[in-house]
Image (cartoon, rainbow, N blue to C red):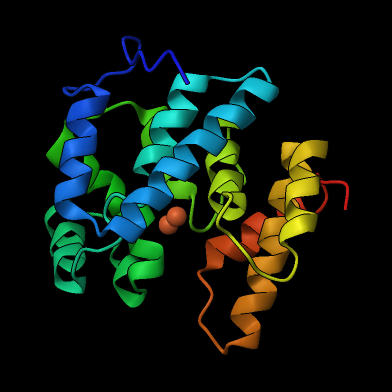
Amino acid sequence: MTDFNYDTIKSDLNRDEILSRMQDTLSDYRYTHCLRVEKVCRGLAAEYDGDVARAGLAGLLHDYAKERSDQEFIDVIKNNDLDPKLLNYNNAVWHGIVGAEIIKDELGIYDEDVLNAVRRHTVGSTNMTQVDKCVFVGDFIEPERDFPGINEARNYAKKSLDSAVAFELKHSLQHLVSKNREIYPETFISYNYWITKGDL
Ligand SMILES: [Fe+2]
Ligand SMILES: [Fe+2]
């Protein structure tokens, strides 16, 4: 892969510097997942004539904060005046929405298109841009993913990003319900919106 040029993206660091920070703060397991998601996101963006650089960078960074402590997220929610309702949730929601604040603080990346894709990768949104969709789907179908429905998910990604987003939201809701897990309201809102847009 070539063209890791982030010149149009407001960032204090180049890719090599970002990779070195990620290696310092993430397990190998998570770091290599992020590299695979970056690659899939760049491929999806290229396939759908999108923003390859932003989709790739957002894919690379989507789980940047995933391994932080609950206390760190709680501190960031309070110190950055984020929605206090976020305190009712957990890492699954925090690492996207709150993780974007940590990325700004630690990496000096202020590109809102990239940050929004990180924020939205866990719960989706009715306002998903193409970059958001690439990350949402790329995280779900990266090559090491293996779960019942993965082939369907990959096929939908070839058909259209909207269909892949709709399938992922449906699959994730079904999974959360089956595990008796809490569901962030935005996930329902995203599902209701995208299920009418995708062609499942
Ligand atoms: Fe994630
Ligand atoms: Fe991920």
Residue 21 x %, y %:
16, 41
Position of residue 142 relative to residue 113, above or below, is below
Residue 126 x %, y %:
62, 46
Position of residue 92 relative to residue 167, above or below, is below
* Left or right side of 169 for 15: left
Residue 114 x %, y %:
40, 32
Q: How many marks?
A: 0
The structure residue drawn at horizontal position 34% and vertical position 57%, both measured from the top left corner, is: 30
Between 42 and 186, the residue placed more toward the observer is 42
Between 2 and 21, the residue placed more toward the observer is 2
Evaluate whether residue 29 shows in this view.
yes
Position of residue 52 relative to residue 39, above or below, is above
Residue 136 x %, y %:
56, 47
Q: Residue reaching furthest bottom?
A: 180
* Left or right side of 37 for 109: left
The structure residue drawn at horizontal position 52% and vertical position 41%, both measured from the top left corner, is: 135
The structure residue drawn at horizontal position 71% and vertical position 60%, both measured from the top left corner, is: 150
Position of residue 115 relative to residue 69, above or below, is above
Quadrant of res 69:
bottom left
Evaluate whether residue 117 shows in this view.
no
Q: Quadrant of ligand 2?
A: bottom left
The structure residue drawn at horizontal position 50% and vertical position 81%, both measured from the top left corner, is: 182
Q: Residue reaching furthest right?
A: 199
Quadrant of res 112:
top left
